[in-house]
Image: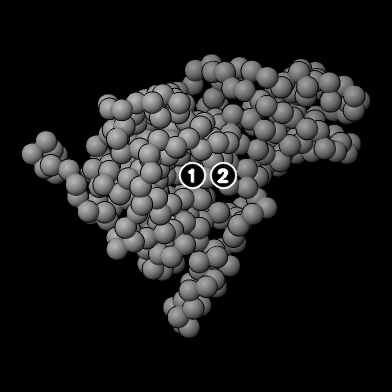
Amino acid sequence: MGRARNVLQHIIHSDKTYVCVMALHEAVPEDKIREVCREFVGDIYQKPPLKASVERRLRVRRIFSIEVQEIIGRLVLMVIHCEAGTYIRKLCHDIGEVLGVGAHMAELRRIHTGPFTEDENLVTMHELHEAVIALREYGDEKLLRKVILPVEYAVRNLPKIYIRDSAVDSICHGAPLAAPGVLHLTDDVMKGGLVAIMTLKGELVAIARALMRAHDMVEASQGIVAKPVRVIMKPGTYPRHWKSSKFVGKG
Amino acid sequence: MGILIKAEDTTDYSYGCPPDQRPIEQHIDLGVINLDKPPGPTSHEVTSWVKKLLGVEKAGHGGTLELN
């Protein structure tokens, strides 16, 4: 919601896990099905479907795993862990082709995107509605606080850089993060990878692209270490420590 | 995962706010919901309901199943 919305488009590029029911068009022996599914683990080529919102160009997607959970007649229940942007409908179709009988996707449910899973914190429309009523009618915030998670939850899987209070406001205005502003960081920060820039209070300031890996960041005494790609915190939340003359015309 | 320390400093609690202590309006504005989307309506429609329900101007959704 609100400012937190800006985080999500960066999160949707993380891996996905789906539960899927594939319907075969003719019966096939179980071991054959399992064998073919195993063949699809790894890098596969896919052309986006006709009604897709991206360019229809052959692209490579990685399938991390396909677990066949149950086979009942022509229906195959499987759990697929794959890279973002994998078309499961297409995958089912292709598995059907290799099996030689044809297949289509009968049902699909995503159970995991980046930090979001189906088991934890999953909220129904009814629960959300009840929580809003509890606040509006009875002034009770408890439910809504349970139903709505802080935006920091959405970046819990990202590498993190914790910065000085004095470095916060310039980042909020879109300035890059300089080495002296860094206090500590997680060792999984990679050069070119996304990171969450955090305050010492644990607030998300921005999502940024790291310009060096964690160990080099610790050694750096000056220079830019990360560039914000999406600022979340409102400017003015922390006091301003930077000189305005350098930023004339940037608002 | 390890933590690498570059420098030590403290934070001033007269500004900013730890995520679990935000006033409710701020908590909503800086909040995400792991919503169990009902199968009928589109993600877009559900987003619009949630916006109306919470009285927020902006809301987005982090993914849709339709095209997969």
Query: Would you call the spot at circle 1 few (<14 residues within 10 Å), some (14-19), or many (20 or more)?
Result: many
Q: Could you tell me how far apart the alpha carbons at marks 1 and 2 are, in whole angstroms?
A: 7 Å
Q: Disc 1: which chain? A: A
Q: Quadrant of the C terminus of chain A?
A: top left
Q: Confirm or deny contact between disc 1 and disc 2 (CB under 8 A).
A: yes
What residue lies at 58% left-to-right and 36% top-to-bottom?
B1
- Is A24 left, or right, of A172 in this rendering? right
Q: Do discs 1 and 2 belong to a common subunit? A: yes
- Is A220 left, or right, of A30 in this rendering? left
Which mark sits nearer the N-terminus, 1 or 2? 2
In the foreground, A139 or A60: A139
For label 2, the SS is loop
Image vertical order of residue B42 relative to residue B66, above or below: below
- Is A200 left, or right, of A147 in this rendering? left
- Is A90 left, or right, of A24 in this rendering? left
Give the labeled residue for mark 2.
A115
Q: Residue furthest front?
A: B8
Q: Disc 2: which chain? A: A
Q: Amino acid at mark 1?
A: Val
Give the labeled residue for mark 1.
A155
In the foreground, A237 or A54: A237
For label 1, the SS is helix
Can you see residue A29? yes
Q: How many marks?
A: 2
Image vertical order of residue A27 relative to residue A168, above or below: above
What residue lies at 51% left-to-right and 50% top-to-bottom?
A153
Q: Amino acid at mark 2?
A: Pro
Rendering quarter of residue A73: top right
Rendering quarter of residue A77: top right
What residue lies at 31% left-to-right and 32% top-to-bottom?
A179
What residue lies at 32% left-to-right and 45% top-to-bottom?
A164
Q: Position of residue A243 (x, y in %)?
A: 13, 42
